[in-house]
Image (cartoon, helix red, strand yellow):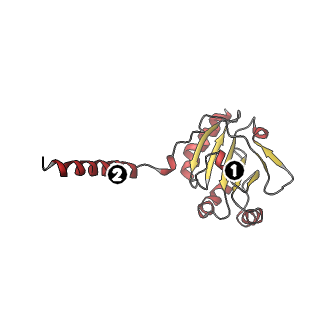
Amino acid sequence: MRYLKFLLPLGVFLGLVAFLAAGLKLNPREVPSPLIDKPAPAFSLTQLENPAQTIRRDDLLGKVWMLNVWASWCVACRQEHPLLVKFAQSKLLPIYGLNYKDSRPEGLQWLARFGNPYDASLFDQDGRVGIDWGVYGVPETFIIDRQGVVRFKHIGPLTPDVIRSRIEPLVRQLNG
């Protein structure tokens, strides 16, 4: 009976350690998105480059496209950007940027300095559209099919392996 006082807390502690150890093995880039296989959230945003022009989700129906969430203040976006510029040259699909919680002048300056891989960049100054898309942070990348359904989400900077092994085959399949 005396040992029970010590065994119960020890058992709870060991259980907690096992639970936390299992969590450390998970990949944070593989957080499941509730948007996968669901219609992309509706939006209507002005273009970063041209505030007089608006793009809506429905304007993009009928084509497979990528949405890349980025910001001028994002260090990881700077890491990802050269790869995105190179990937855009393949013209495999249109790439739309979502300039997230940024200022228009800083976003434009960033694109002028590092290159512009986007067919257009949407300006989401207050982050409301990003919230609708379930954005945890930047960068994040989505692939949307012709019917406007989200088919893929990647959290964090894109890598050559993710583009080669996940995005390119998916885009080919969706366009096939």
Instruction: Report which residue position mark 1 lands on.
Output: 128
Q: Residue 29's spot in the image, x, y percent?
A: 51, 50
89, above or below 35, in the image: below
Is 120 or 132 nearer to us in this picture? 132
Q: Is residue 114 left or right of residue 23?
A: right
Q: Is there CB contact under 8 Å for labels 2 and 1? A: no
Q: Which mark is residue 18?
A: none
Q: Which residue is mark 2?
A: 21
Q: Of discs 2 and 1, which sits in the foreground?
A: 1
Task: Return the x and y of residue 4 as percentages of the image width and height.
Answer: 16, 47
Side of 19 where 140 appears, left or right:
right
What's the residue type where badge 1 is placed?
Arg
Of pointers 2 and 1, the one earlier in the residue sequence = 2
Toward the viewer: 83 or 148?
148
Using residue 170 as the reference point, say whether residue 105 is left or right of it: right
Q: Amino acid at mark 2?
A: Ala
**Neighbour class for label 1 at 10 Å: few (<14), some, many (≥20)?**
some
Residue 35 in percent (x, y) is at 60, 39
Q: Is residue 89 visible?
A: no
Identify the residue shown where x is 71% and y is 52%: 97
Q: CA distance from mark 2 to mark 1?
A: 35 Å
Q: Can see residue 47?
A: yes
The foreground one among 172 and 15 is 15
The image quarter containing residue 107 is bottom right
Which corner quadrant of the image does residue 153 belong to? top right
Position in image of residue 176 (x %, y %): 66, 32
In the image as oriented, which residue stretches furthest toward the right? 52
How crowded is the residue under tag 2: few (<14 C-alpha within 10 Å), some, or many (20+)? few
